Image (tube, rainbow, N blue to C red):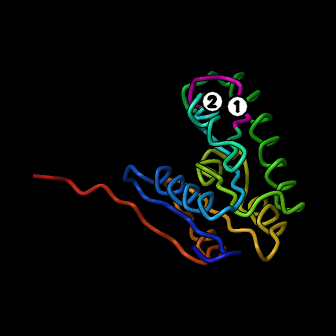
């Protein structure tokens, strides 16, 4: 994977996050620092003993406080989690502006657009904090037309029905 590029893994198929994590393993094996921020997955992989063993090369962050996925929360819980998720976006911006890693994975960040937690403009501002060397991978099921122009490479992962 070329340094400094923006990659998107999208589509209705399973495997977007595993593909991004595979890139994280490759980058770590090359001596690069990786940060993974998961959104819309509750606590995701952040409370996992295995992922903690990958540190310091690969660091996982989740800003959501519940184990429940966002869509299943009450409106009050969603309001609280929206604030936590925005803290995660601000953390990502800080990581990018300080050159805090070589590869930043924003897992399910495109889903934040779908539920209105962030806007396309918010995403553009976040990505503008990136330096020339940092690579970003974003994942999400839906790919809005406005996001396509932000990427250097897009991979679509689809489910194919088996008869």
Magenta residues span 62-69
Q: Between disc 1 and disc 2, whose residue precedes?
A: 2
Quadrant in the picture for residue 99: bottom right
Q: Residues within 10 Å of mark 1 (few under 14, many from 20)?
A: many
- Mark 1 falls on what kind of element? loop
**Residue underneath mark 2:** 43
Label number found at residue 64: 1
Nearer to us of marks 1 and 2 is 2
Q: Is the Cβ of the residue at disc 1 closer than 8 Å to that at disc 2?
A: yes
- Residue 129 at x, y percent in the picture: 84, 66
Q: Residues within 10 Å of mark 2 (few under 14, many from 20)?
A: some
| Magenta residues, dominant SS class | loop
Q: Is residue 112 above or below residue 136?
A: above
Q: How many marks?
A: 2
- Residue 76 at x, y percent in the picture: 72, 22
Q: Is residue 160 above or below residue 38?
A: below
Quadrant in the picture for residue 75: top right
Q: CA distance from mark 1 to mark 2?
A: 6 Å
| Residue lying furthest left | 163
Q: Residue at point 68% right, 68% down?
A: 135
Q: Is residue 82 above or below residue 28?
A: above
Looking at the image, which is closer to me, 53 or 152? 53
Q: Residue at point 73% right, 56% down?
A: 119
- Mark 2 falls on what kind of element? loop
Left or right of 87? Residue 10 is: left
- Residue 31 at x, y percent in the picture: 67, 61
| Residue 64 magenta-highlighted | yes
- Residue 90 at x, y percent in the picture: 84, 48
Q: Residue at point 46% right, 68% down?
A: 155
């Amino acid at each position: 994977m070329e340094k400094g590029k923006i990659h998107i893994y999208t589509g209705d198929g399973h495997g977007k996050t595993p593909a991004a994590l595979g890139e994280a393993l490759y980058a770590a094996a090359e001596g690069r620092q990786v940060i993974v921020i998961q959104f819309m997955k509750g606590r995701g992989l952040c409370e996992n003993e295995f992922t903690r063993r990958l540190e310091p090369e690969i660091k996982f962050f989740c800003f959501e406080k519940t184990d429940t996925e966002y869509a299943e929360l009450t409106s009050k819980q969603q309001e609280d989690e929206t604030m936590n998720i925005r803290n995660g976006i601000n953390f990502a911006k800080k990581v990018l502006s300080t050159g805090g890693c070589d590869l930043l994975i924003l897992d399910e960040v495109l889903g934040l657009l779908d539920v209105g937690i962030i806007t396309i403009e918010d995403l553009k501002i976040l990505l503008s904090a990136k330096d020339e060397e940092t690579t970003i991978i974003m994942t999400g099921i839906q790919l809005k037309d406005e996001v396509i122009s932000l990427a250097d490479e897009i991979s679509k992962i689809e489910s194919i029905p088996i008869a």
